[in-house]
Amino acid sequence: MISCEEFLAEFGDYLENRISPEVRQELELHVSQCRACHVLYDSSRKTVKLVTESSSFELPESVSEPIIDRVMARLRTGRS
C-alpha cells in the first residue's frame, strides 16, 4: 500500500483525473484504509462539488486559474 506522502503527491492529479487506472486504484485503496487521507479526500471532493455547482463563486478565468494552480501545486507537494 502507498504511504500518506505518496497519496498527497498524487492527490491533485487524482482530483483532476490525470492519473493512470493503476495509480487511481492504489489511491482509492489507500483512502479506504487511511482515516486521515479519507477525511482529506471527502472534504476536498465536497468542496469541489460545492464550488463547481454554485454560480455564486463565478470568477473571471484570469483570477481563478492562478488560484487553482496554487492549490494544486500545494496538494502535489503535500504542503498546507
Image (tube, helix red, strand yellow):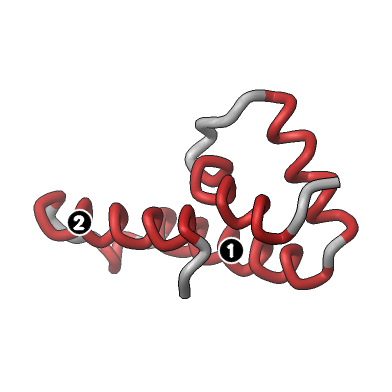
Q: Amino acid at mark 2?
A: Pro
Left/right of residue 56 with respect to residue 51 in the rendered view = left
Q: Residue at x 56, y 51 (%)?
A: 9
| Number of marks drawn | 2
Left-right relation of 63 to 71: left
Calculate the distance from the C-alpha at mark 2 to the C-alpha at mark 1: 21 Å
Q: Name the quadrant containing residue 66.
A: bottom left
Badge 1: how crowded within 10 Å, few (<14), some, or many (20+)? few
Residue occupying the point 73% across, 44% down: 27
Q: Which image quadrant is residue 19 in?
A: top right
Residue identified by numbered label 2:
66
Q: Position of residue 31 (x, y in %)?
A: 79, 55
Q: Dot 2 lies on which element?
A: helix
Badge 2 or badge 1: first in the primary sequence: 1
Residue wearing tag 1 = 46
Q: Nearer the viewer, residue 43 or 54?
A: 43
Q: Is residue 40 above or below residue 8?
A: below
Question: Could you say which disc has been placed on residue 5 in the image?
Answer: none
Q: Determine crowd level at label 2: few under 14, some 14-19, many 20+ residues with C-alpha closer than 10 A.
A: few
Query: What element does badge 1 sit on?
Result: helix
Closer to us: mark 2 or mark 1? 2
Q: What residue is at 29 percent from the left and 66 percent from the top?
A: 57
The amino acid marked with disc number 1 is Lys
Across and down, in percent, residue 3 comes to 76, 55
Q: What residue lies at 30% left-to-right and 60% top-to-bottom?
A: 70
